[in-house]
Image (tube, grey):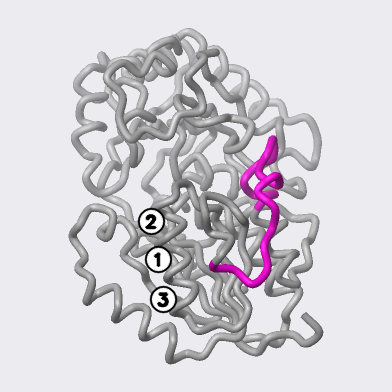
């Protein structure tokens, strides 16, 4: 590209966590094209958080989960595509790599319908023929997905910086979240949910961990979860001997991000809250089932996270469900408690002035 495009479409039509992971690549595109009008196409679930990214000028919503579930008809999708085409984009960039041939076909059609003269993304799962410039699929091998997305951004003229992923919330949200968590004791958040059922450790195991931490470490437990996950948190609470603060289903996405930033430690399945914790600099214990920890581990200071997983031959796995998720069943409550105890000790005795605020994390930040 010899001339910076005037109007850019960034596509991250995936989940909330995927949007947070894309924040570094989006920022690179803004830095590489400071005068461009940058639009973001993202999922309805992720849009509330997307509105706080200063590198984005306009946001369009794509009902990706509804489409996959058959709840959005062709007419609704055509409407989205027509709206994109009217905006006359010069460049369209698909930041999040396609995960299947069907996903690549959907993305390819969307990019073509956008009308952008230049279409850039990674050549995997059959997306290549829809692109005018490709990043080799070999770029995926052995690399964190954040670094892959930055590579795609560079191919589109983006300029990387030395900062990590980010997540923001408004001052109004900051005010609303005051008082939700108690002062005076360490607070450990537990996120027992997640979009895919085969990424969820059992509620009984989470309850066991919560009781041990309360009784052995004197912590306060806060249960987290998004809309529709209230029953999972209730199952954890029902299996506990002790009380906990149950915030599941009570928080907006911005409020959840703010609350996560105030935790001493988060214990979480591989899910959006895991990536949010990495973005805001909260120490965490991340439990991995079918996904590859090397590709999706928390993108933050290595001192700020512990990954717990079992060595199994069937990982990575793209199944949405599993009759016998041995990858999670082999994780013991003892191992999770031990990792959490290590992070609590480090939190009480920080290693130095840069603890939790290095170049790959963002501590308790928000935008006006």
Pointer 3 or 2: first along the chain: 3
Element marked by disc 2: helix
Task: Categorize mark 1 by other alpha carbons within 10 Å: few (<14), some (14-19), many (20+).
Answer: some
Residue at x 35%, y 20% (from the top left corner) = 206
Identify the image quadrant of residue 163.
bottom right
Residue at x 64%, y 29% (from the top left corner) = 347
Above or below — where is 314 with respect to 140? above
**On the rendered structure, is 69 left or right of 173?**
left
Q: CA distance from mark 3 to mark 2?
A: 18 Å
Above or below — where is 257 with respect to 286? below
Q: Which residue is mark 2?
A: 253
Most foreground residue, 69 or 282: 69
Q: Which residue is mark 3?
A: 60
Q: Which residue is mark 1?
A: 48
The quadrant in which the C terminus is found is: bottom right
Percent across and percent down for residue 44 are 34, 64
Q: Are marks 2 and 1 in contact (CB under 8 Å)?
A: yes
Residue at x 55%, y 77% (from the top left corner) = 9
Residue 224 visible somewhere in the drawing: no
Most foreground residue, 59 or 337: 59
The quadrant in which the N terminus is found is: bottom right
Element marked by disc 1: helix
Above or below — where is 178 with respect to 343? below
């Amino acid at each position: 590209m010899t001339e910076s495009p005037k109007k850019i479409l960034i596509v991250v039509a995936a989940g909330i966590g995927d949007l947070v992971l894309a924040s570094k690549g989006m920022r690179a595109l803004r830095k590489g094209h400071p005068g461009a009008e940058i639009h973001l196409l993202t999922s309805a679930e992720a849009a509330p958080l997307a509105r706080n990214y200063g590198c984005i000028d306009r946001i369009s919503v794509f009902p990706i989960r509804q489409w996959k579930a058959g709840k959005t008809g062709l007419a609704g999708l055509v409407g989205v595509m027509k709206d994109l085409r009217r905006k006359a984009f010069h460049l369209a960039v698909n930041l999040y790599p396609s995960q299947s041939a069907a996903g690549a076909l959907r993305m390819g059609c969307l990019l073509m319908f956008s009308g952008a003269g230049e279409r850039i993304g990674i050549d995997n799962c059959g997306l290549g023929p829809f692109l005018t410039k490709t990043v080799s699929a070999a770029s995926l091998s052995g690399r964190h997905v954040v670094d892959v997305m930055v590579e795609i951004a560079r191919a589109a003229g983006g300029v990387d910086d030395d900062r990590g992923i980010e997540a923001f919330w408004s001052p109004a949200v900051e005010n609303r979240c005051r008082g939700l968590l108690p002062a005076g004791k360490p607070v450990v958040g537990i996120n027992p949910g997640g979009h895919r059922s085969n990424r969820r450790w059992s509620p009984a195991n989470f309850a066991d961990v919560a009781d041990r931490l309360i009784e052995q470490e004197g912590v306060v437990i806060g249960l987290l979860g998004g809309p529709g996950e209230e029953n999972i948190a209730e199952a954890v609470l029902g299996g506990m001997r002790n009380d906990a603060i149950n915030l599941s289903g009570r928080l907006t996405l911005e409020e959840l991000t703010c609350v996560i930033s105030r935790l001493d430690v988060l214990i979480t399945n591989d899910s959006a809250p895991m990536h949010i914790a990495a973005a805001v600099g909260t120490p965490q214990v991340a439990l991995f089932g079918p996904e590859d920890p090397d590709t999706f581990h928390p993108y933050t200071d290595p001192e700020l996270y512990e990954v717990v997983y079992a060595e199994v031959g069937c990982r990575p796995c793209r199944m949405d469900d599993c009759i016998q998720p041995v990858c999670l069943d082999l994780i013991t409550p003892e191992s999770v408690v031990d990792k959490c105890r290590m992070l609590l000790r480090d939190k009480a005795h920080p290693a130095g002035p840069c603890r939790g605020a290095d170049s790959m994390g963002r501590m308790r930040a928000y935008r006006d």
